[in-house]
Amino acid sequence: MKVVLLSLLSLLLGRQPIDQSVPPTKVHVRGVELHYIEQGQGEPLILLHGGQGDYRSWGPQMEAFSRHYRVICYSRRYNYPNNNPLMAKNHSAYVEADDLAAFIRKLKLGPVHLVGTSMGAFAALILAVKYPEMVRSLVLAEPPIHPWVRDSPDGAAVYREFRTTVWEPAAAAFKAGDDQGAIRILVDGFAGTHRFDNLLP
């Protein structure tokens, strides 16, 4: 398995939108339905969307990637147009990773290339750790791995510091109606002190 750092330029390849006149295919895995579309031939490449996206999120990239791969875009279990009941309050990327494993088995894809962003990237990462034989390569953009940091022996203190110095102060600022102050806390917390002010004209 090869891990690749994501270049944003690679996401800008191609400009063809997904043909909305072609309905997605529906499969059932682990008691839920998943809708997907595919295009091209070759080694399978699965594109995993972030939290608020769905299978259509990768329209601009699908045309370019399908010149070299069998590209598959699917909607994760609680995203459009899937109609799945909320089965548990503790839904997580771990559940999504098991869905992904079942999806790969259902389509008999064998080892796959995975490209993911945000929660989709986290699910891909969990899959690669849990089922390395299913993954050829990983391209990940901003997987929210906070739970891994929190639950690791060396990461618990780092996670607590992040919560107390960034996340909770930003939430308090939003609650108080200070949106700009909240964004300043978040940007500086993620990118470094005074980064927010340096972004302003």
Image: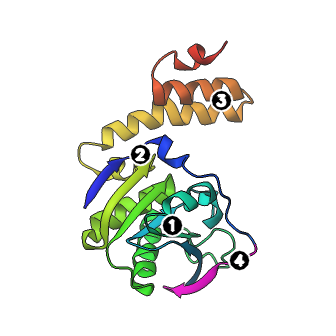
Q: Mark 1, residues whose alpha carbon is within 10 Å: few (<14), some, or many (≥20)?
A: few
Name the residue at 61% across, 36% down: 171
From mark 2 to mark 3, how far is it between C-alphas?
32 Å
Q: Mark 3, residues whose alpha carbon is within 10 Å: few (<14), some, or many (≥20)?
A: some
From mark 1 to mark 4, how far is it between C-alphas?
34 Å
From mark 3 to mark 1, how far is it between C-alphas?
27 Å
The picture places residue 38, in percent across and down from the top left corner, at 55, 74
Q: Which residue is labeled 3 in the image?
A: 173
Name the residue at 33% across, 49% down: 4
Q: Which residue is labeled 2 in the image?
A: 6
Amino acid type indicated by mark 4: Val
Name the residue at 65% across, 63% down: 56
Amino acid type indicated by mark 2: Leu
Q: Which residue is labeled 1 in the image?
A: 90
From the image, state whether disc 2 or disc 4 is nearer to you.
4
Residue range in magenta is 21-30
From the image, state whether disc 2 or disc 1 is nearer to you.
2
The picture places residue 106, in percent across and down from the top left corner, at 44, 86
Q: Is residue 21 left or right of residue 76?
A: right
The picture places residue 64, in percent across and down from the top left corner, at 53, 57
As displayed, is residue 198 above or below residue 146?
above
Callout 2 touching callout 3 (CB < 8 Å): no
Callout 1 touching callout 4 (CB < 8 Å): no
Name the residue at 37% across, 64% down: 113
Q: Which residue is labeled 4 in the image?
A: 22
- Seen from the viewer's position, the closer of residues 167 and 125 is 125
From mark 3 to mark 4, how far is it between C-alphas?
45 Å
Amino acid type indicated by mark 3: Ala
Callout 3 touching callout 4 (CB < 8 Å): no
